[in-house]
Amino acid sequence: MADPATISGVSVFAPEVTPGAEHLKQLIREVPDFPKPGINFYDITTLLKDKTGFKETIDLLQQHYRSVPVDVVVGIEARGYFFAPAMAHALGAGFVPVRKPKKLPSAVRSIEYALEYGTDQLEIHSDAIEDGQRVLIIDDVLATGGTASAVARLVEQSGGKVAGLGFVIELTFLNGHQKLAGYDVFSLIRY
Ligand code: AMP
């Protein structure tokens, strides 16, 4: 494995792949022009179906958080649900879903956030997070960071403390990290 510091043109602090995750990049399928022209979609179903790739993904994410106290892992609908419950199991934490509107059956807290065109909304059960609980937020892809920063606010409004935000993939050219300034943001694979 090459030392990240020796890879020309790549920052020492942000190599394209977290050490140990190099081969996982080959398991991610890139689908051009999905769901609309101009979007290069990073399809993680090819990673999920790989019996060692999925396990290694969870193991590597878990390693990053093993010394971070976490009470609850929050997963973001829908693709965050592929990873967040497995992370909750690995860390010995609870799992809480953040859902699209009108899906949760009991009282909810909602947040509206801006999209490129228009707005979107996410919801969490009002009693899902107890005051002071340490919450890890997990999603598949960090793109512009709009979704993840809305979920971080939702967690804080619920009384939780954001222990970190973890992603399998980060699209660094969209600068999602900037929207999440002040939080521990970690990703395994970066494009
Ligand atoms: P964001 O722009 O960070 O709010 O991204 C919103 C959501 O869209 C993320 O949770 C990802 O699951 C998904 N997403 C955005 N861009 C991509 C992409 N290029 N490939 C796959 N998923 C994406």
Image (spheres, rainbow, N blue to C red):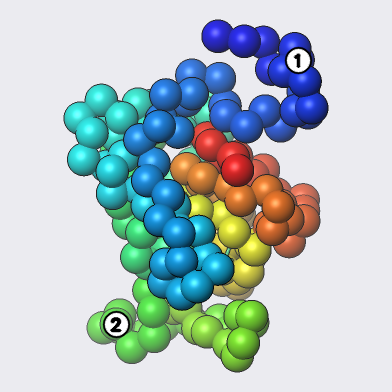
In the picture provided, is 153 more to the left or to the right than 72?
Answer: right
Looking at the image, which residue is at 67% across and 10% down?
Answer: 3
Q: Residue 167, image x and y in percent? A: 51, 46
Q: Which residue is mark 1?
A: 5
Give the CA distance from mark 1 to mark 2.
46 Å
Disc 2 residue crowd, few under 14, some 14–19, many 20+, Cα 10 Å: few
Label 2: which secondary element: loop
How many numbered dots are placed on residues in this image? 2
- Pick the residue in front: 36 or 61: 36
Q: Which mark is residue 187?
A: none
Q: Amino acid at mark 1?
A: Ala
Q: Earlier in the sequence, mark 1 or mark 2?
A: 1
Q: Which residue is mark 2?
A: 103
In the picture provided, is 9 more to the left or to the right than 59?
Answer: right
Asked if marks 1 and 2 touch (Cβ < 8 Å), the reply is no
Quarter where residue 81 is shown: bottom left
In the picture provided, is 181 more to the left or to the right than 137?
Answer: right
